[in-house]
């Protein structure tokens, strides 16, 4: 499947089958995330894999009750080791670049998972401090994205997208 097809066919899925994620596939997904670009190659992104049912329940609470998280066989919490970027870029690095880096890694997770037949959902609505507690993160680690991964139980229709004419501006707005 071409990358352009994967991009267009990826959906936010909230219903997962119970079958486990193959360990080799999970490694390939994480390897794709590891190769995402990062500001100054600081590589601040780290991942917490959650398969434990009790941990997933805690994560549901920390994620404002998004219960579908618990259905997924694996949940990836994409985090940033903030000092790695702050050392090089100061405040701008810790307030902006780490989010860019986490987003790039998360996108790679979504695309690689889709290419391997898995579904994902981007979750950004959560209580940061509660998630940190669930994953026992040290002070310098900030969670940025939660991604449940599993075989899809549903295949949502594609949402409407704005046309290129609506979103492209030449040289200025």
Image (spheres, rainbow, N blue to C red):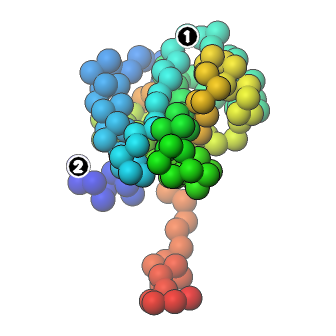
Q: Relative to residue 151, is residue 121 depicted above or below? A: below
Q: Tell me if residue 97 can be seen.
A: yes
Q: Is residue 94 left or right of residue 11?
A: right
Location of mark 1 (residue): 52
- Residue 163: percent from the left, percent from the top? 49, 77
- Residue 67: percent from the left, percent from the top? 69, 27
User: Which residue sits at x=61%, y=34%?
Assistant: 142
Marker count (numbered): 2
- Residue 173: percent from the left, percent from the top? 56, 88
- Element at badge 1? loop
Q: Relative to residue 168, is residue 34 depicted above or below? A: above
Question: In terms of image quadrants, where is residue 128?
Answer: top right
- Residue 6: percent from the left, percent from the top? 33, 51
User: Which residue sits at x=48%, y=21%?
Assistant: 49
Tell me if mark 1 has few (under 14), some (14-19) or many (20+) residues whose alpha carbon lies within 10 angstroms of its own. Answer: few
Q: Is residue 27 left or right of residue 12?
A: left
Task: Out of 140 and 21, give the one closest to the viewer.
Answer: 140
Q: Of tags 2 and 1, which is closer to the observer? A: 1
Location of mark 2 (residue): 1
Q: Tell me if residue 117 can be seen.
A: no
Residue furthest left as drawn: 1
Q: Earlier in the sequence, mark 2 or mark 1?
A: 2
- Element at badge 2? loop
């Amino acid at each position: 499947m071409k990358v352009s097809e994967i991009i267009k066919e990826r959906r936010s899925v909230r219903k997962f089958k119970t079958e486990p994620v193959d360990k080799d596939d999970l490694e390939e997904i994480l390897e794709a995330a590891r190769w995402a670009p990062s500001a100054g190659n600081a590589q601040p992104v780290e991942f917490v894999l959650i398969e434990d049912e009790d941990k997933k329940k805690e994560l549901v609470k920390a994620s404002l009750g998004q219960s579908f998280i618990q259905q997924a066989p694996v949940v990836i919490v994409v985090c940033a080791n903030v000092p790695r970027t702050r050392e090089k870029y100061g405040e701008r690095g810790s307030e902006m670049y780490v989010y860019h880096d986490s987003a790039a890694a998360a996108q790679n997770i979504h695309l690689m998972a889709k290419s391997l037949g898995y579904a994902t959902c981007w979750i950004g609505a959560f209580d940061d401090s509660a998630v940190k507690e669930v994953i026992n993160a040290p002070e310098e680690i900030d969670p940025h994205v939660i991604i449940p991964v599993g075989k899809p139980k549903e295949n949502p229709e594609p949402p409407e997208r704005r046309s290129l004419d609506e979103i492209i501006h030449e040289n200025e707005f």
